[in-house]
Amino acid sequence: MDGINIFLEKSAVIRKMYIENLDKADPGFKEKWLKHFGYLPRFFEEIYNVCNGTYAEIEEQVYFDFIPGFRLMQIDEIIQKYQEEFKNCQEFELIIPFLADYGDFYYAYVRRKGIESIAYISDEGMEIIHNDISSFWKTIIAFYDENVYYLDEDGYLSYDFEREGEIGRKYNIGISYWI
């Protein structure tokens, strides 16, 4: 599944200049990534071959969000956050944050016993929210297809909380986050 391109196409339908406001892909990102992580998950290769996320200090704030409240982090930022907070985690083989909110909450790629998942990291800890990468893409793409995501009156990406839970449960069976 080419999740990033499908997702960006769906996003561009309601946010006309979103793609143009993403930082351009860094042609040397693989080298930089491998130097720090030693392994490049297909998930990140797919995303960062297309773009290098959103600047934390983006000029047009309406284009900040990749999903409501969270922007796609840039490679250097991911590496720095990994080194500072997630490098020595004992519970998982690998935790790599890739979506950041305005504070210290993240969506992260996690791998345990070779299984790739997506976790949500907050003040309350870390919780698996997608059992696999495919579920992550299917869920956030469905949020566009089923009108969960929309633009508020000020042009910011927002979401219908109830519908988000319904659709989330549909694509993430057995995940307590969505219950």
Image: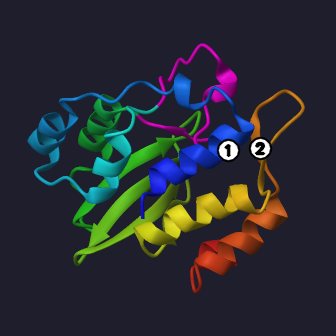
- Side of 69 where 107 appears, left or right: left
Image quarter (top left, top right, bottom left or bottom right) of the N terminus? bottom left
Boundaries of the magenta span: 54-73
- Disc 2 marks which residue? 158
Q: Is residue 169 magenta?
A: no
Q: Which mark is residue 149?
A: none
Q: Quadrant of residue 109?
A: bottom left
At which x and y percent is residue 175? 57, 79
Give x and y (percent) for residue 27. 22, 29
* Pointer 1 residue: 68
Label 2 or label 1, whichever comes before in sequence order: 1
Q: Is residue 153 left or right of residue 81?
A: right
Residue placed at 54% from the left, 23% from the top? 21
Amino acid at dot 2: Ser
Indicate the position of residue 34 as horizontal and vertical percent values. 12, 44
Residue at screen point 55% across, 31% down = 19
User: In the picture, residue 12 is in which quadrant?
Assistant: top right
Q: State if disc 1 and disc 2 touch (CB < 8 Å).
A: yes
Q: Residue at x 70, y 26 (%)?
A: 62
Q: Quick check: is 60 in the magenta stretch?
A: yes
